[in-house]
Image (tube, rainbow, N blue to C red):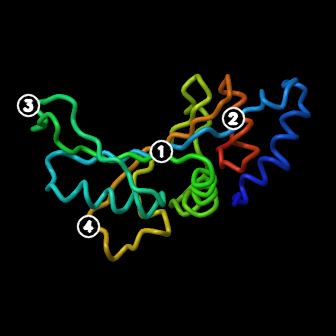
Amino acid sequence: MNSRLYKKFVEEVKPSLLGNGRFKNVHEVPKLEKIVINMGVSASLEKVAVDDAAKDMTAIAGQKPVITKAKKSVANFKLRKGQNVGCCVTLRRDRMYEFFDRLVATALPGIRDFRGLNPRRFDGRGNYTIGISDQTIFPEIDLDKIKRHQGMDITIVTTAATDEQAHELLKLMGFPFAER
């Protein structure tokens, strides 16, 4: 079953990008490849903090996250090798489009004083990263059950060769960029 946003991509965005004349072949047109959501948890918090973050991320993404572990020990941060430090989930295909749709339509407009996202946060290869300071902007999170406010990083990976192509793709998909 295809999501509403995927249908929009096939019926409107792809022909629009092809009509510009920049792409000669249908397969050159940039598209969304995956969305990676990452939540880091302070190692000094109690051990159930990672479990709570994973539970919240499961509700947000609709997919169980992978628990990430520390690769090396750092004494100043009271961090030991192999200690749980966060969780990460990679969304592809239908789940990716549904999450993107929920992010753009409900979550981002729910941020207080939201005026759009910075269009300069591309990494040089067509990928865009957003840092969100609170997980409560997502309607799937029950405000009565959260113990601590947790931030997350969302990376949108595209097949675009340049940042300009990725910017155009995301803008046509309805991504709320601030005016330059």
Q: Nearer the viewer, mark 2 or mark 1?
A: 1
Q: Amino acid at mark 1?
A: Thr
Which one is earlier in the sequence, the residue at label 2 or at label 3? 3
Q: CA distance from mark 2 to mark 3?
A: 41 Å
113 or 147, which is in the foreground? 147
Q: Residue at x 40, y 57 (%)?
A: 57
Q: Secondary structure at mark 2?
A: helix
Would you say the residues marked 3 and 1 are in contact, meaning their CB atoms lie under 8 Å apart? no
Q: Amino acid at mark 2?
A: His
Q: Is residue 108 left or right of residue 15?
A: left
State if disc 1 and disc 2 touch (CB < 8 Å).
no
Task: State whether residue 100 is above or below residue 28.
Answer: below
Label 2 CA crowd tier, 10 Å (few <14, some 14–19, many 20+)? many
Q: Are marks 2 and 3 in contact (CB under 8 Å)?
A: no
The reply to whether dot 2 and dot 4 touch (C-beta < 8 Å) is no
Residue 79 sits in which quadrant? top left
- Amino acid under label 4? Lys
Q: Nearer the viewer, mark 1 or mark 4?
A: 1
> Of marks 3 and 1, which one's residue comes earlier in the chain?
3
**Mark 4 or mark 3, which has the lower sequence index?**
3
Q: What amino acid type is highlighted by mark number 3?
A: Ala
Q: Which residue is mark 3?
A: 75
Across and down, in percent, residue 112 comes to 51, 61
How many angstroms separate mark 3 from mark 1 (CA)? 31 Å
Do the residues under discs 4 and 3 have CB atoms within 8 angstroms?
Answer: no
Mark 2 highlights which residue? 167
Q: Which residue is mark 1?
A: 90
State the residue at coordinates (24%, 44%): 85
Residue at the spot 24% in from the left edge and 39% down from the top edge: 69
Q: Position of residue 120 (x, y in %)?
A: 59, 32
Q: Earlier in the sequence, mark 1 or mark 4?
A: 1
